[in-house]
Amino acid sequence: MTEVRDPARRPPLTLSLIVSTAIGVADEGGLDAVTMRRVGERLNASGMALYRHVANRDELIALMIDKVVGEYAYPVPRPEGWRAALAASARQDWRSFFAHPWVLRATASTRPPMGPNMLANMEWALAVFDGLNVTGRERLHLLSSVVSYVHGLAMTWLPAASAGREGTARWWRDQLDSAGHDRYPRLAELTTDLAGDPSWQEEVDEEFEFGLARVLDGVEAYVSGRADRP
Protein backbone atom coordinates (compact mmCIF):
# COMPACT_ATOMS: atom_id res chain seq x y z
CA MET A 1 0.00 0.00 0.00
CA THR A 2 1.41 3.37 -0.99
CA GLU A 3 1.73 5.86 1.84
CA VAL A 4 -0.31 9.02 1.30
CA ARG A 5 1.51 12.05 2.57
CA ASP A 6 -0.46 15.03 3.78
CA PRO A 7 1.33 18.22 2.67
CA ALA A 8 -0.40 20.14 5.46
CA ARG A 9 1.37 17.97 8.06
CA ARG A 10 4.74 18.16 6.38
CA PRO A 11 7.25 20.51 8.07
CA PRO A 12 9.07 22.86 5.72
CA LEU A 13 12.15 21.03 4.53
CA THR A 14 15.41 22.72 5.45
CA LEU A 15 18.94 21.41 5.38
CA SER A 16 19.22 21.78 9.15
CA LEU A 17 16.05 19.75 9.72
CA ILE A 18 17.19 17.03 7.33
CA VAL A 19 20.56 16.71 9.06
CA SER A 20 19.04 16.67 12.56
CA THR A 21 16.54 14.02 11.49
CA ALA A 22 19.27 11.89 9.94
CA ILE A 23 21.24 12.09 13.19
CA GLY A 24 18.19 10.80 15.04
CA VAL A 25 17.92 7.88 12.61
CA ALA A 26 21.60 7.04 13.08
CA ASP A 27 21.38 7.29 16.88
CA GLU A 28 18.53 4.77 16.84
CA GLY A 29 19.62 2.34 14.14
CA GLY A 30 23.27 2.99 13.37
CA LEU A 31 24.91 4.40 10.27
CA ASP A 32 23.47 1.77 7.92
CA ALA A 33 19.96 2.91 8.84
CA VAL A 34 20.59 6.32 7.29
CA THR A 35 19.14 6.35 3.78
CA MET A 36 17.59 9.21 1.89
CA ARG A 37 14.33 7.30 1.78
CA ARG A 38 14.19 6.60 5.52
CA VAL A 39 15.07 10.15 6.46
CA GLY A 40 12.42 11.37 4.03
CA GLU A 41 9.84 9.11 5.67
CA ARG A 42 10.65 10.63 9.05
CA LEU A 43 9.97 14.05 7.55
CA ASN A 44 6.80 12.92 5.77
CA ALA A 45 8.50 13.66 2.46
CA SER A 46 9.88 11.66 -0.42
CA GLY A 47 13.52 10.75 -0.56
CA MET A 48 13.75 12.64 -3.83
CA ALA A 49 12.64 15.82 -2.09
CA LEU A 50 15.78 15.67 0.04
CA TYR A 51 18.01 15.88 -3.02
CA ARG A 52 17.01 19.50 -3.46
CA HIS A 53 18.92 20.23 -0.25
CA VAL A 54 21.72 17.64 -0.16
CA ALA A 55 23.51 16.02 -3.10
CA ASN A 56 23.68 12.44 -1.82
CA ARG A 57 24.02 10.20 1.23
CA ASP A 58 27.77 10.76 1.54
CA GLU A 59 27.25 14.50 1.75
CA LEU A 60 24.47 14.00 4.28
CA ILE A 61 26.72 11.90 6.52
CA ALA A 62 29.49 14.49 6.29
CA LEU A 63 27.00 17.15 7.39
CA MET A 64 25.81 14.91 10.24
CA ILE A 65 29.37 14.45 11.47
CA ASP A 66 30.07 18.17 11.36
CA LYS A 67 26.88 18.95 13.27
CA VAL A 68 27.85 16.55 16.06
CA VAL A 69 31.36 18.02 16.11
CA GLY A 70 29.75 21.43 16.59
CA GLU A 71 27.59 20.03 19.39
CA TYR A 72 30.80 18.93 21.13
CA ALA A 73 32.92 21.90 20.10
CA TYR A 74 36.09 22.44 22.07
CA PRO A 75 35.69 24.91 24.93
CA VAL A 76 36.09 28.64 24.52
CA PRO A 77 38.02 30.17 26.11
CA ARG A 78 40.65 27.49 25.75
CA PRO A 79 41.92 26.11 29.09
CA GLU A 80 45.28 27.56 30.07
CA GLY A 81 48.24 25.32 29.37
CA TRP A 82 48.61 22.84 26.53
CA ARG A 83 48.02 19.81 28.77
CA ALA A 84 44.69 21.01 30.15
CA ALA A 85 43.60 22.07 26.68
CA LEU A 86 44.45 18.72 25.05
CA ALA A 87 42.68 16.89 27.87
CA ALA A 88 39.58 19.03 27.35
CA SER A 89 39.49 18.29 23.63
CA ALA A 90 39.99 14.56 24.23
CA ARG A 91 37.10 14.49 26.71
CA GLN A 92 34.81 16.22 24.23
CA ASP A 93 35.63 13.63 21.57
CA TRP A 94 35.12 10.80 24.08
CA ARG A 95 31.69 12.10 25.09
CA SER A 96 30.62 12.57 21.49
CA PHE A 97 31.40 8.95 20.60
CA PHE A 98 29.26 7.60 23.42
CA ALA A 99 26.43 10.02 22.68
CA HIS A 100 26.50 9.22 18.94
CA PRO A 101 28.33 5.87 18.46
CA TRP A 102 27.92 5.94 14.67
CA VAL A 103 30.28 8.93 14.44
CA LEU A 104 33.26 6.76 15.33
CA ARG A 105 32.52 4.33 12.52
CA ALA A 106 31.80 7.13 10.06
CA THR A 107 35.11 8.85 10.73
CA ALA A 108 37.18 5.66 11.02
CA SER A 109 36.02 4.04 7.78
CA THR A 110 36.53 7.07 5.58
CA ARG A 111 37.92 10.59 5.65
CA PRO A 112 34.89 12.87 5.25
CA PRO A 113 35.27 16.42 3.98
CA MET A 114 36.09 18.75 6.85
CA GLY A 115 33.13 21.00 7.55
CA PRO A 116 33.37 24.33 9.35
CA ASN A 117 33.01 22.81 12.81
CA MET A 118 35.70 20.21 12.16
CA LEU A 119 38.03 22.87 10.78
CA ALA A 120 37.40 25.07 13.83
CA ASN A 121 38.17 22.20 16.21
CA MET A 122 41.31 21.32 14.29
CA GLU A 123 42.56 24.92 14.38
CA TRP A 124 41.73 25.08 18.11
CA ALA A 125 43.69 21.89 18.79
CA LEU A 126 46.76 22.90 16.76
CA ALA A 127 46.83 26.26 18.56
CA VAL A 128 47.28 24.38 21.84
CA PHE A 129 50.98 24.14 20.95
CA ASP A 130 51.47 27.87 20.37
CA GLY A 131 54.55 29.09 22.18
CA LEU A 132 56.15 25.66 22.28
CA ASN A 133 59.22 24.90 20.26
CA VAL A 134 57.56 22.41 17.90
CA THR A 135 57.05 22.49 14.14
CA GLY A 136 53.73 22.26 12.34
CA ARG A 137 54.41 18.63 11.51
CA GLU A 138 55.20 17.89 15.16
CA ARG A 139 51.97 19.56 16.23
CA LEU A 140 50.04 17.24 13.95
CA HIS A 141 51.87 14.14 15.17
CA LEU A 142 51.40 15.02 18.83
CA LEU A 143 47.72 15.76 18.31
CA SER A 144 47.28 12.53 16.35
CA SER A 145 48.73 10.57 19.28
CA VAL A 146 45.98 11.88 21.54
CA VAL A 147 43.20 11.50 18.97
CA SER A 148 44.26 7.95 18.11
CA TYR A 149 44.15 6.97 21.78
CA VAL A 150 40.60 8.30 22.18
CA HIS A 151 39.43 6.60 18.97
CA GLY A 152 41.05 3.29 19.87
CA LEU A 153 39.65 3.07 23.39
CA ALA A 154 36.20 4.13 22.20
CA MET A 155 36.25 1.39 19.56
CA THR A 156 37.07 -1.10 22.32
CA TRP A 157 34.31 -0.02 24.67
CA LEU A 158 31.43 1.02 22.43
CA PRO A 159 30.20 -2.54 21.69
CA ALA A 160 30.20 -3.21 25.43
CA ALA A 161 28.39 0.06 26.07
CA SER A 162 25.52 -1.00 23.81
CA ALA A 163 25.25 -4.34 25.64
CA GLY A 164 25.49 -2.77 29.08
CA ARG A 165 27.58 -4.02 31.98
CA GLU A 166 25.53 -7.17 32.56
CA GLY A 167 25.61 -8.00 28.85
CA THR A 168 29.40 -7.68 28.85
CA ALA A 169 29.72 -9.91 31.92
CA ARG A 170 27.41 -12.46 30.28
CA TRP A 171 29.57 -12.47 27.16
CA TRP A 172 32.69 -13.19 29.22
CA ARG A 173 30.89 -15.94 31.14
CA ASP A 174 29.91 -17.60 27.86
CA GLN A 175 33.51 -17.54 26.68
CA LEU A 176 34.79 -19.08 29.90
CA ASP A 177 32.02 -21.68 30.05
CA SER A 178 33.29 -23.16 26.82
CA ALA A 179 37.01 -22.59 27.45
CA GLY A 180 37.16 -23.51 31.12
CA HIS A 181 37.10 -21.19 34.13
CA ASP A 182 39.99 -22.97 35.86
CA ARG A 183 42.33 -22.32 32.95
CA TYR A 184 41.77 -18.55 33.08
CA PRO A 185 41.36 -17.55 36.75
CA ARG A 186 42.07 -13.86 36.16
CA LEU A 187 39.41 -13.62 33.46
CA ALA A 188 37.00 -15.43 35.76
CA GLU A 189 37.71 -12.87 38.47
CA LEU A 190 37.18 -10.04 35.99
CA THR A 191 33.82 -11.50 34.97
CA THR A 192 32.71 -11.55 38.59
CA ASP A 193 33.82 -7.95 39.07
CA LEU A 194 31.96 -6.82 35.95
CA ALA A 195 28.74 -8.38 37.16
CA GLY A 196 29.05 -7.08 40.69
CA ASP A 197 29.84 -3.38 40.24
CA PRO A 198 26.95 -1.25 38.93
CA SER A 199 29.17 1.79 38.15
CA TRP A 200 30.14 0.51 34.70
CA GLN A 201 30.30 3.90 32.99
CA GLU A 202 32.37 5.30 35.80
CA GLU A 203 34.85 2.47 35.38
CA VAL A 204 35.09 3.07 31.63
CA ASP A 205 35.67 6.78 32.20
CA GLU A 206 38.28 5.98 34.85
CA GLU A 207 40.19 3.84 32.36
CA PHE A 208 39.92 6.63 29.80
CA GLU A 209 41.30 9.21 32.22
CA PHE A 210 44.15 6.92 33.29
CA GLY A 211 45.23 6.25 29.72
CA LEU A 212 44.80 9.89 28.70
CA ALA A 213 47.13 10.98 31.50
CA ARG A 214 49.76 8.50 30.30
CA VAL A 215 49.50 9.74 26.70
CA LEU A 216 49.85 13.33 27.88
CA ASP A 217 52.87 12.29 29.94
CA GLY A 218 54.45 11.14 26.70
CA VAL A 219 53.61 14.41 24.96
CA GLU A 220 55.05 16.33 27.90
CA ALA A 221 58.29 14.35 27.76
CA TYR A 222 58.64 15.11 24.05
CA VAL A 223 57.85 18.81 24.42
CA SER A 224 60.23 19.14 27.37
CA GLY A 225 62.99 17.54 25.31
CA ARG A 226 62.44 20.13 22.59
CA ALA A 227 62.45 23.13 24.92
CA ASP A 228 66.11 23.99 24.40
CA ARG A 229 66.22 23.22 20.70
CA PRO A 230 67.31 26.18 18.51
Image (spheres, rainbow, N blue to C red):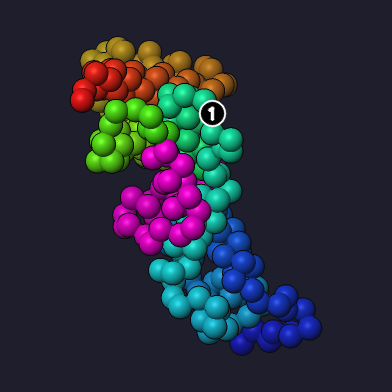
Residue 132 placement (x, y as % from top left)? 34, 28
Would residue 126 appear left or right of 226 to someone viewing this image? Answer: right
Quarter of the picture containing the C terminus is: top left
Q: Which residue is mark 1?
A: 79
Q: Looking at the image, how many numbered discs can be counted on the residues?
A: 1
Would residue 140 appear left or right of 128 to someone viewing this image? Answer: left
Q: Is residue 224 inside the magenta stretch?
A: no
Would residue 215 appear left or right of 101 to someone viewing this image? Answer: left
> What range of the chain is rendered magenta?
99-127
Q: Residue at x 59, y 58 (%)?
A: 24
Q: Residue at x 46, y 42 (%)?
A: 124
Residue 212 placement (x, y as % from top left)? 39, 24
Disc 1 marks a residue whose amino acid type is: Pro
Q: Is residue 26 visible?
A: no
Q: Residue at x 33, y 50 (%)?
A: 108
- Along the line of sight, the residue nearer the viewer: 204 or 133: 133
Magenta stretch, main secondary structure class = helix
Q: Is residue 103 inside the magenta stretch?
A: yes
Farthest residue toward the right? 8
Farthest residue toward the front? 230
Residue 145 placement (x, y as % from top left)? 30, 33
Q: Residue at x 53, y 40 (%)?
A: 74
Q: Is 208 rendered above or below residue 1?
A: above
